[in-house]
Amino acid sequence: MTKQYGKFGGMYIPEILIAPIEELSQKWKSLKSDEDFLLQLHQELESYAGRPTPLTEVPSFAKYIGGPRVFLKREDLLHTGAHKINNAIGQCLSGKALGKTRIIAETGAGQHGVATATACARLGLQCVVYMGAKDIERQAPNVTKMRLLGAEVIAVNQGRKTLKEAVNEALRDWSSSYEDTHYCLGSALGPYPYPDIVATLQSVIGKEARQQVLHVTGQLPTHVIACVGGGSNAIGIFSGFIDDEAVSLVGVEAGGTGKNLGENASRFATGSPGVLHGCYTYLLQDSCGMIAETHSISAGLDYPAVGPQHAHLYELGRATYSSVDDNQALEAFRILSVEEGIIPALESSHALGYALQQSYAADDTIIINLSGRGDKDLPQLMSEGVIR
Ligand SMILES: *Cc1c(COP(=O)(O)O)cnc(C)c1O
């Protein structure tokens, strides 16, 4: 089978999904360079989502790590509070270009569901979101938002009732609905062409960050750091620097509560290659290939597979991957809030937490992708008694 990212990627799909995946592949090839489509996308991102996002220097935070120049790419300032809206708007516009009137999506914590419901409301598309029943209980505010935005939220009661099962149900829906339905997948994974679609739609982060850092410092950064769930915000910012070999790229996974299988979502440290949801990549699985349980304080990083392009960058050594545990992420969450007046998402706090474990030279320049804001995490942290 053709793999798009070295050994990784592919389209491991049941026969019934070949027709819609082929249709999407063909259309995507032309949309990628279609000037009308790109103009419309640019206009929506600028006038509706809030692009370009600033690059903010954070000198007080930088003091904790030896005083390099540290910049945050402020995806937290986007409409709906994270980078996910870049992908949701792009895919909903693609769905429209394909002539579809209905959008389906999976969601775990609800962030991708909210972004997709938002884009559908804006663009006049019907929206159905599949969500595990356990996640619906845990993430009530996001369920309310999706319904308010006009989306139908369908509870998935299979298996562990979380994200993995929600993806299965979305794929099942799509296999019988693709005539009028586009499946808006939430991260840079799944069967090809999804990893490419999502990475391309998120590449705007890296393009802007590159221009901005050159404008402010006159130089490329020495390090670019991003958290990695499925890998979309990371590949988005990495793509701006991937050809600049001197720029060190660091992906940060969820270290959870420990190093053992089931205690984290560190696919590179704890996992091995296998197939899940249509692609060959690094996974958390047991010795029989059964998908393992995962844990992270941050729901957006809590997924057993990582995007195939990251698996390739890992094997090439072009990017390095590290992990930060729940407590280190929480410490970073507090430090950025107090020192800079920015409450980061728990996901982004992992990227910040990685930087806090390092010591840099004063002439280093570091960009950390602040993938989202922390408001969404406050109810969880309050109910767990972590903050008051
Ligand atoms: C969903 C989410 C992530 C993780 O997803 P990626 O595809 O790895 O980017 C990271 N940060 C925030 C704020 C999120 O909502």
Image: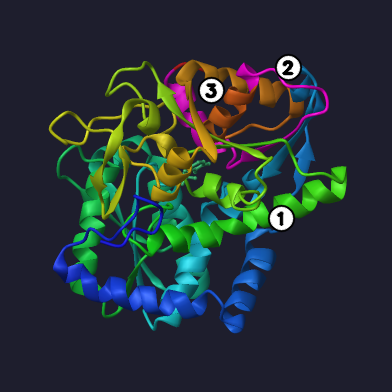
Q: Give residue 299's quadrant in the image.
A: top left
Q: Nearer the viewer, residue 16 or 114?
A: 16
Q: Which residue is tagged 3?
A: 329
Q: Where residue 44 sits: x, y (%)?
A: 62, 69
Horizontal and vertical percent position of residue 347: 51, 34
Q: At 78% from the left edge and 22% from the top edge, which residue is drawn? A: 361
The tag on residue 64 is: 2
Total marks placed: 3
Foreground residue among 21 and 150 = 21
| Residue 232 appears left or right of 305 | right
- What SS does tag 1 mark? helix
Q: Is residue 388 visible?
A: no
Check mark 3 vs ligand 1: CB closer than 8 Å? yes or no: no
Q: Secondary structure at mark 3?
A: helix
Look at mark 1 in the image and give the residue it sits on: 208
Q: Quadrant of residue 157?
A: top left
In the rendered structure, are the residues bearing label 3 and label 2 in contact, judged by CB atoms less than 8 Å apart? no
Indicate the quadrant containing the C terminus: top left, top right, bottom left or bottom right: top right
Residue 190 is at least partly visible in this image: yes
Specify whether residue 376 is painted magenta. yes
Q: Is residue 22 left or right of residue 352?
A: left
Point out the residue furthest to the left here: 288
User: For the residue labelled by badge 2, is the local secondary structure a helix, a strand or a loop?
Assistant: helix
The residue mark sitting in front, 3 or 1, is 1
Task: State which region is magenta.
Answer: 356-384
What residue is rendered at 71% in x and 21% in y?
Answer: 338
Mark 3 is surrounded, within 10 Å at the Cα level, by few (under 14), some (14 to 19) or many (20 or more) other residues, namely: many
Q: Amino acid at mark 1?
A: Glu
Up/down of 277 relative to 27, above or below: above
Q: Position of residue 59 (x, y in %)?
A: 81, 27
Amino acid type at circle 2 is Tyr
